[in-house]
Image (cartoon, rainbow, N blue to C red):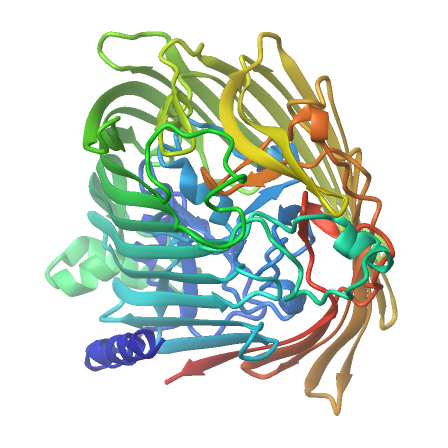
């Protein structure tokens, strides 16, 4: 922790001398450049945005700019540090930063091929990486410090994040983001210790644009395998001993999953185009005429012209060096005897290591939208090379390497300018050189219909549709994995054909989302349990895991309705999701998922924005996926020993405040917990924390 604070202070002081003043409004040439890159400044809300700072993300393929709201919105701040998500969509093993999986199939990932290192996926609550960097443009140095706290030195959770942004001139911005989380855990052997940091820089000129990010991720998750019996939580009166959370017997004691990833991302583009006269207001007509006729003052002339990018050459480069190690030392719990159901390597301790190196290059040529009146949409052709090298141990525990090369050729048509219609359609064909047939077609369309303003409804209707059709090879780790207690080589897995369509209708405080997905040859992990011992009425099982592939199509449908209601200071936000699947045994989904938030919103002494309320998370009973420490992934439960979870509300009470540049909250989580009542589990045999008190603080500094 001391090292993290020291690095933060060093990074904080380095760029201060480079800061220069920046006008609040972008100059005309930069505004035109942003529109040519898909940056629509009209979509950036100025509400709650710190003075003079704007943020955006870039597309990982082509570096297209997408504005994102700066994270200073006070509403919902009390849930920003919830591992189960701000509206409780995710199951997780209980501790802060623990592995998680969404209960909504639309959030469970869309492409195994695009995730060559699947071990980071369960940590998407914490991991930002270079793909999630928010680039900034700021008038003056900007710093944000956020701190979240829960519990004490024995079982509590701490998280500190720091963001620093600075500009050197109007076009060059840089900064860093660092995030450190330490969850000691209320149950035995359940701690987490995570670090995610990145440095970034951007330059956005008339002809040249560049976005650069470098990041490091380190995750350490101690595994306890769950408690020996759910009855310790559900029926504590049946045991002669009253167990506290730190006293309950667990299945694993000295086991850890450790992940590390170093990343470098660079996307840059060069624009070819011409200068044209900038449209001017009526009172400047004479000045334009003078500039047009004399053309003797180049600075005056350039000030009255704007650059029009006709075409762009784009290059994107990324490199990821990742590793994952599972360790289980001799001694403690069942780690050396009955927990593991299969052994493929000798030894009384596990030390499984796998490594991945990915180097990706994309080259694209774009004919930009809007350089003439006839060019209503942009056109792009591209090629990509993806080099991947994996390392796994062989039977002699020596690391053996497997290399894969992917080539992709594709085209895209995109329309981002305009106020009411935007669309994007991309198609690409992939090959390993010897294997053909993999492809990806994806697209989206958004339509904004303006309506006459009414006091009870919004003034616009927004309709958006997106979807894809993908035929892709399962990820490498679904085809190959080598470890002491899990081992497979599936060279003959079929390609996965995945089709999804999703539509969203938004009108004022109402939002309706519908999604349909069909998967052929669905590929998944499945757990195997075998009973090995019965002691004092408690049955213990050995654990194994493997890959399976469905021989039939699987369809999933979901409809989500969200409605925000308000009457004076009283507010009620609701979200309900209904789902169904044609095969609940391999794609388990709860039929209903509900989030409800009832609160009062007012200002105290006219300056302190105050929210006081209570929210609830609820889902119907289903056979939730189980967490498998051996591979650090979620898997389908063994059908013979499957347990159902759900039909148990989780209620939190909170007070959330905002004063000028400071946000802070106090939250009581799981206030409805009662020993022996309900079924307080999100993951099989991994109980939730009992009533806990949290507080958080976020402070913006603008120099």
Q: Residue 569 or 597: which is nearer the viewer?
A: 597
The answer to whether residue 414 is seen in the rendering is yes
Q: Residue at x 34, y 21 (%)?
A: 411
| For residue 388, above or below residue 222 | above
Q: Residue 393 or 547: which is nearer the viewer?
A: 393
The quadrant of the image that shows the N terminus is: bottom left
Q: Locate residue 75, reporting x and y percent.
A: 67, 67
The answer to whether residue 453 is seen in the rendering is no
Q: How many marks?
A: 0
Residue 8 as seen in the image, left or right of residue 617: left
Q: Residue at x 18, y 54 (%)?
A: 293
Q: Residue 574 or 223: which is nearer the viewer?
A: 223
Q: Residue at x 29, y 8 (%)?
A: 435
Quarter residue 534 falls in: top right
Residue lying farthest left?
Answer: 296
Residue 495 as seen in the image, left or right of residue 384: right
Quarter residue 484 falls in: top left
Q: Residue at x 47, y 79 (%)?
A: 700
The quadrant of the image that shows the C terminus is: bottom left
Q: Locate residue 599, reporting x and y percent.
A: 82, 68
| For residue 294, above or below residue 409 | below
Residue 268 as seen in the image, left or right of residue 514: left
Residue 231 as seen in the image, left or right of residue 28: right
| For residue 608, above or below residue 534 | below
Q: Locate residue 186, reporting x and y percent.
A: 62, 66
Q: Locate residue 421, reporting x and y percent.
A: 56, 34
Quarter residue 431 falls in: top left
């Amino acid at each position: 922790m001391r090292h993290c604070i020291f690095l933060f202070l060093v990074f904080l002081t380095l760029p201060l001398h480079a800061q220069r003043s920046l006008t609040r409004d972008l100059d005309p040439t930069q505004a035109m450049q942003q529109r040519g890159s898909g940056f629509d400044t009209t979509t950036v809300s100025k509400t709650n945005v710190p003075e003079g700072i704007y943020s955006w993300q870039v597309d990982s393929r082509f570096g297209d700019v997408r504005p994102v709201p700066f994270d200073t919105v006070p509403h919902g701040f009390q849930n920003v540090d919830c591992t189960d998500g701000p509206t409780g969509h995710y199951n997780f093993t209980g501790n802060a930063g623990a592995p998680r999986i969404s209960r909504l199939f639309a959030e469970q990932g869309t492409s195994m091929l695009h995730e060559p290192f699947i071990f980071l996926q369960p940590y998407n609550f914490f991991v930002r990486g270079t793909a999630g960097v928010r680039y900034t443009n700021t008038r003056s140095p900007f710093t944000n410090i956020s701190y979240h706290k829960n519990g004490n030195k024995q079982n509590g959770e701490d998280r500190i994040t720091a963001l620093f942004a600075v500009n050197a001139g109007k076009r060059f911005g840089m900064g860093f983001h660092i995030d450190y989380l330490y969850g000691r855990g209320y149950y035995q052997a359940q701690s987490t210790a995570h670090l995610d940091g990145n440095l970034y820089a951007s330059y956005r000129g008339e002809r040249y644009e560049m976005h650069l990010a470098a990041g490091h991720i380190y995750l350490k998750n101690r595994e306890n395998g769950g408690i020996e019996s759910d009855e310790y939580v559900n029926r504590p009166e049946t045991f002669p001993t009253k167990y506290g959370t730190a006293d309950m017997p667990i299945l694993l004691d000295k086991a850890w999953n450790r992940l590390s990833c170093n990343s470098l991302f660079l996307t840059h583009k060069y624009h070819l185009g011409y200068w044209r006269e900038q449209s001017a207001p009526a009172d400047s007509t004479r000045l334009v005429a003078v500039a047009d006729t004399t053309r003797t003052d180049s600075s005056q002339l350039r000030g009255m012209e704007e650059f029009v990018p006709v075409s762009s050459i784009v290059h994107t480069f990324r490199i990821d060096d990742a590793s994952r190690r599972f360790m289980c030392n001799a001694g403690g719990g069942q780690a050396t005897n009955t927990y593991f159901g299969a052994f493929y390597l000798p030894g009384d301790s596990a030390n499984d290591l796998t490594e991945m190196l990915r180097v990706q290059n994309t080259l694209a040529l774009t004919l930009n939208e809007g350089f003439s009146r006839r060019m209503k949409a942009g056109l792009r052709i591209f090629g990509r090379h993806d080099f991947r090298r994996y390392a796994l141990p062989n039977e002699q525990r020596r690391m053996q390497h497997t290399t894969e090369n992917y080539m992709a050729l594709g085209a895209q048509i995109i329309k981002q300018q305009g106020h009411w219609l935007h669309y994007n359609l991309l198609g690409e064909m992939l090959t390993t050189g010897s294997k053909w047939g993999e492809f990806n077609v994806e697209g989206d369309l958004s339509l904004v219909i303006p309506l006459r303003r009414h006091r009870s409804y919004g003034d616009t209707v927004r309709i958006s549709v997106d979807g894809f059709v993908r035929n892709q090879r399962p990820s490498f780790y679904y085809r190959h994995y080598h470890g002491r207690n899990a081992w497979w080589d599936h060279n003959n897995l079929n390609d996965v054909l995945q089709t999804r369509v999703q539509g969203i209708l938004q009108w004022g405080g109402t939002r309706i989302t519908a999604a349909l997905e069909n998967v052929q040859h669905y590929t998944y992990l499945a757990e195997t349990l075998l009973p090995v011992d019965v002691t004092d009425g408690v049955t213990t099982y050995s654990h194994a895991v493997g890959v399976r592939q469905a021989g039939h199509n699987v369809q999933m449908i979901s409809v989500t309705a969200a409605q925000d209601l308000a009457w004076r200071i009283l507010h009620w936000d609701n979200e309900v999701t209904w789902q169904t699947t044609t095969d609940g045994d391999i794609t388990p989904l709860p039929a209903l998922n509900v989030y409800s938030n009832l609160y009062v919103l007012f200002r105290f002494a006219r300056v302190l924005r105050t929210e006081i309320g209570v929210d609830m998370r609820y889902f119907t009973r289903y056979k939730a996926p189980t967490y498998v420490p051996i591979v650090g992934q979620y898997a389908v439960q063994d059908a013979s020993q499957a347990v159902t979870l759900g039909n148990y509300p989780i209620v939190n009470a909170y007070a959330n405040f905002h004063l000028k540049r400071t946000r802070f909250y106090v939250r009581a989580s799981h206030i409805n917990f009662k020993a022996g009542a309900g079924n307080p589990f999100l993951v099989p045999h991994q109980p939730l924390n009992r009533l806990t008190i949290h507080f958080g603080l976020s402070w913006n500094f603008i120099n």
